[in-house]
Amino acid sequence: RADVNVAYGVWASSAYVRLNDVTVSTSGDMGIFVAGVRLSSWSSVEASSVTVYGAHGIVLEGSTMSLVSRSTAVTGGLNVYALYLRDSSSNTVTQTLARKLGDQNGAALMVSSASNFNTVTQSTFTADANGFSAALAFIEGSSSNTLSQVYAQNPSGFAGGFASGARNNRVKDSVFWSGVSDYAALLFVTSHENVVERVHALNPAGQGLKMQDTSSWNSVSDSTMVVNMAPGASGTMSA
């Protein structure tokens, strides 16, 4: 536990570091102000729990071939992410729960800065905030990533978002759930050549799937959108 102000709970700047059955958390008004755990390449965090506030949970920055498995990451505060992949490629996230608490901007999972060829599978991501928030987001040219068997929930905003040049990503066998009229369960903004397969995008109050701002050459197949069709009514659409 961090009972004084420190930047990191664990910062492993060297490669080939393994964290197993580790708990990182903050205490009282003191705590971690950058990230609970930050890993480099060819490293792993497994069967571990990271809980912070005002900081990122687990960070892979400039990482390749690292693993996050059977772990929980929780954060709250403004512009922070429970699980953050930045400029990182060919990493795997599996059987992991990431939660963004509170109504401030942020995300449970953020993949940014041209993070490519990552795999996220059998994991759950939850948030409860509107504005520039989502349960999970892929932005800034992140491409060729795969999401499979993922559940993403944000009752107050976007559940999943792809934006700012996200390209050639594949989303399959997953569920995205939102519960507010102004937002879509799954959103694509200025994103191209992404593939959506066997996905349920659920928003009984608003839109299931939305593509906007020159998003092009995206493909949707074998998927179901549960949406608000008219005031007081809802419906199901399949693609």
Image: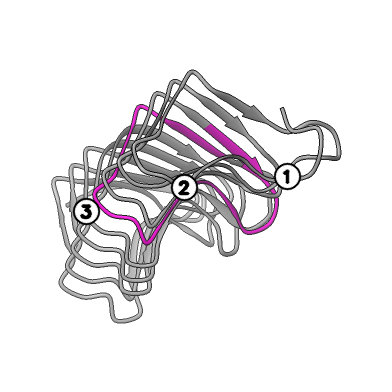
> Is 4 drawn above or below residue 179 in the view shown?
above
- Residue at 45% of width from left, 48% of height from top? 233
Disc number placed over residue 6 in the picture, else none: 1
**Residue 21: percent from left, percent from top:** 49, 18
- The magenta region covers 73-99
Q: Kindly give the residue lying farthest to the right in the view shown.
A: 29
**Residue 140: percent from left, percent from top:** 38, 70
Q: Nearer the viewer, residue 35 or 137?
A: 35
Judging by the rendered image, the residue that carries numbered circle 2 is 13
- Whichever of labels 3 and 2 marks the residue nearer the N terminus, that label is 2
Q: Nearer the viewer, residue 184 or 20?
A: 20
Q: Check disc 2: other Cα within 10 Å, few if <14, some if 14-19, many if 20+.
A: few
**Residue 49: percent from left, percent from top:** 55, 26
Q: Is residue 53 left or right of residue 155?
A: right
| Magenta stretch, main secondary structure class | strand
Q: Secondary structure at mark 3?
A: loop
Instruction: Check residue 89 for magenta coloring.
Output: yes
**Residue 110: percent from left, percent from top:** 45, 54
Q: Check disc 3: other Cα within 10 Å, few if <14, some if 14-19, many if 20+.
A: many
Judging by the rendered image, the residue that carries numbered circle 3 is 117
Of circles 2 and 1, which is in front? 2
Residue type, mark 2 in image = Ser
The reply to whether residue 160 is in sight is no
Q: Secondary structure at mark 2?
A: loop
